[in-house]
Image (cartoon, rainbow, N blue to C red):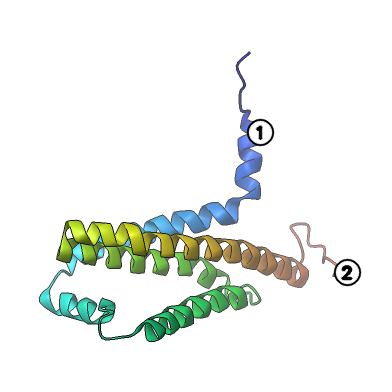
Amino acid sequence: MKPYVSLDCIDDLIKNEKETIYAVLFYVAGLLLGSLSFGLYNSTAVINLLSSLYSSQQFGFTATFTNAFTIYISVFLIVVFSGLFLIGYPVIYAVPVIIGIAVSVKTTFFFTQYGAKGIGYSLLMIIPECSAFVAVIICAIRTSSLVSEHIQKCTFGDKNGQNIKIS
């Protein structure tokens, strides 16, 4: 007997995981936007700027680690605190786009500058680091958007106009 997936099951999955699906779609849109924008603005000034930003030779391990940790914790806190405010809801979904653009520009830069070495560096260093970061951010986005949605329902009421009591 052949197993099948009903459309109700797919509808429930989409309904229950819509925050995660939106975050992944916005991240992919950021990846595409970053790749296309790097191709459009590929000039010597941009290359020199990115070379100075991504050159870890001038910084030590501690400075590089501190810089990356500060950026990652800042983005995480932006997502978390955006979920506590009604106005912050669009910011929650802008974060994956910005992360996607940054990852795409970094990967494209190393590919265009170093060829096969850039691909190897991206596969070994950039992609695993960003994959872990994006997974954490997607979980934070899901939680923050659910908190924001609950605050909105408590403040303005649900679809029927009934206020929800916080217990």
Looking at the image, which residue is at 42% across and 65% down? 129
Name the residue that disc number 2 marks. 167
Q: Quadrant of the N terminus?
A: top right
Residue 65 pos. (x, y %): 42, 80
* Kind of residue sitting beneath label 1: Asp
Looking at the picture, tell me which residue is in the foreground, 46 or 12: 46
Residue 143, image quadrant:
bottom right
Element at label 2: loop
Looking at the image, which residue is at 63% across and 72% down? 83
Could you tell me how far apart the alpha carbons at marks 1 and 2 are, in whole angstroms? 32 Å
Q: Residues within 10 Å of mark 2 (few under 14, many from 20)?
A: few
Residue 51, image quadrant:
bottom left
Element at label 1: helix
Name the residue furthest left. Answer: 44
* Kind of residue sitting beneath label 2: Ser
Residue 113 pos. (x, y %): 16, 66
Residue 166 pos. (x, y %): 85, 70
Looking at the image, which residue is at 74% across and 66% down? 153
Looking at the picture, tell me which residue is in the foreground, 68 or 105: 68
Q: Is residue 37 left or right of residue 123?
A: left
Name the residue furthest right. Answer: 167
Q: Is residue 97 left or right of residue 34?
A: right
Name the residue that disc number 1 marks. 8
Of the numbered discs 1 and 2, the one sitting upstream in the chain is: 1
Image disc number at residue 48: none
Q: Quadrant of the C terminus?
A: bottom right
